[in-house]
Amino acid sequence: MKAQEAAQIIDSITTALKENPNQFNLSINISGFSSHVTGGGIGAIGIANQGGCGIYSSISTDNFNMDIINEKANGKINEDITNLLNTLASISEELKKDKPNKSKIYTLYEMLKNTWVPGVITSVIGNLLSMVLF
């Protein structure tokens, strides 16, 4: 396989993720202390322990309910997806060069491993790179 062909496959993966970012499910479990107040109190606070995603605050009075964590979690997920897309684009751009920098490509690929990135993506990218660079 040629580097240009690998770059085209990576570009296809990037395009698919941009067009359908909901194709992967992310499941977040939070455990720890929580309390709940009914009848009008200030709400409930739950603290995530052992690598959770942060602090959860829910304020509710009668019919009003505002989940603060939802906005922060969505912001973090969007940031992580943007970083993934940028990393894939950087790998592709480097592969398209006449003399790709193997060290740079390897460093970019390592950034994807052992993270939230679905294994199918890191596996495909890793296999492409091994066919092209090594």
Image: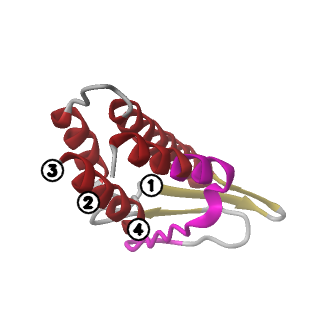
State which mark lies toward you, 1 or 2: 2
Q: Which mark is residue 21?
A: none
Look at mark 1 in the image and give the residue it sits on. Answer: 55
Look at mark 3 in the image and give the residue it sits on. Answer: 134
Q: CA distance from mark 1 to mark 2?
A: 24 Å
Residue visible at 34% across and 42% down in the picture: 3
Q: Which region of the structure is painted magenta?
A: 13-35
Residue visible at 31% across and 51% down in the picture: 112
| Amino acid marked by disc 1 | Ile
Within-10-Å neighbours for mark 3: few <14, some 14–19, many 20+: few
- Can residue 31 be seen? yes
Q: Earlier in the sequence, mark 3 or mark 2?
A: 2
Residue 87 lies left or right of residue 126; in this view the side is right
Q: Earlier in the sequence, mark 1 or mark 2?
A: 1
**Quadrant in which residue 63 is drawn:** bottom right
| Amino acid marked by disc 2 | Asn
Mark 2 element type:
loop
Within-10-Å neighbours for mark 1: few <14, some 14–19, many 20+: some
Q: Earlier in the sequence, mark 3 or mark 1?
A: 1
Residue visible at 24% across and 27% down in the picture: 99
Residue 14 lies left or right of residue 61; in this view the side is left
